[in-house]
Image (cartoon, rainbow, N blue to C red):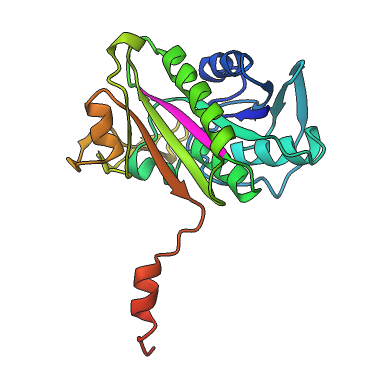
Amino acid sequence: MLILVSNDDGIYAEGIQVLAETLKKIARVIVVAPDREKSAASHSLTLHRPLRILEIKKNFYAITGTPADCVNLGVNEILDRKKPDLIVSGVNHGGNLGDDVHYSGTVSAALEGAMMGIPSIAVSLVLRDGRPYFKPAANFAAKLAKRVHKEGLPKGIVLNVNVPNLPQHSLKGYAYCKLGKRNYSDIIVEKLDPRKKKYYWIGGDEIGYENIPGSDCNAILERKISITPIKVDMTDYPFLEKIRSWKV
């Protein structure tokens, strides 16, 4: 089995290093990741400047672009259009729950793989502070990778996995979930530079989860690993049928 590994935290992030080493026990692994942090890059592609491929060491490549760029170049250039059996993106340093999937570069790397017809998984560690427990997340990713390789995934489907930041013995299993709803305080911070010109930081502290039974957020609160199938095709088919009767 050949697995292409990527992320949005960058090639030197601990999460991707632990993931790659763990997956090497079950497959040949090629790592293609951004040369620096690209969190919240979503599914952006770099179209207006050249990209460079930097070989860090054997089978480890840094790209001067986004996570989606990494998967694109990884498959089409580094692997010379030989599709890997699987793409695993992560382990992200922070959760990708609920609405986060729309902003996440980690999830988008997996979605880029799905758009290429490659079974893909995104794996994130839900933490804010303290010591990160990447190993349990990487171990679970390896188990899931073997299952996906055996069973396959429907076209255009990605498995979005979130793992509580806990040691292995404290995890309460896993659950198949729908996306939940994370609540943030939408904050724009205005500052002045030394020349008295305004600049801004976009940010927002997490203020909690909505209590939605069966959601990924609730699974995390229950100390369970969440597994959520998400899809490239964002068409709302029931509403599509309803609006067919609209006259505009």
Secondary structure mostly seen in magenta is strand
Q: Residue 226: horizontal and vertical position, in percent?
A: 35, 32
Q: Taking 236 as reference, is 19 above or below it?
A: above
The reply, left or right, for residue 112 in relation to residue 222 is right
Name the quarter where the C terminus is drawn.
bottom left
Taking depth in this image into account, of 204 and 89 the one nearest to the observer is: 89
Report which quarter residue 126 is drawn in.
top left
Residue 156 visible (yes or no): yes
Residue that appears at 42% across and 32% down: 161
| Camera sees residue 206 | no
In the orientation shown, which residue stands out farthest toward the bottom? 247
Residue 203 image position (x, y, % from top left): 35, 36
Outermost residue on the left side: it is 211
- Determine whether 244 is above or below 193 in the image: below
In the rendered structure, which segment of residues is drawn in magenta? 120-126
In the rendered image of this protein, does residue 7 appear above or below residue 110?
above
Residue lying furthest right in this view? 80
Quadrant of the drawing holding the N terminus: top right
Compared across the picture, whether 241 is left or right of 121 comes to left
Verify whether residue 79 appears in magenta: no
Residue 93 placement (x, y as % from top left) = 44, 23
Residue in the image at 63% along x and 43% along y? 118
- Number of numbered discs on residues: 0
Asked whether 141 or 113 is in front, the reply is 141
Residue 97 x/y as whole percent: 35, 37
Quarter of the rendering containing residue 35: top right
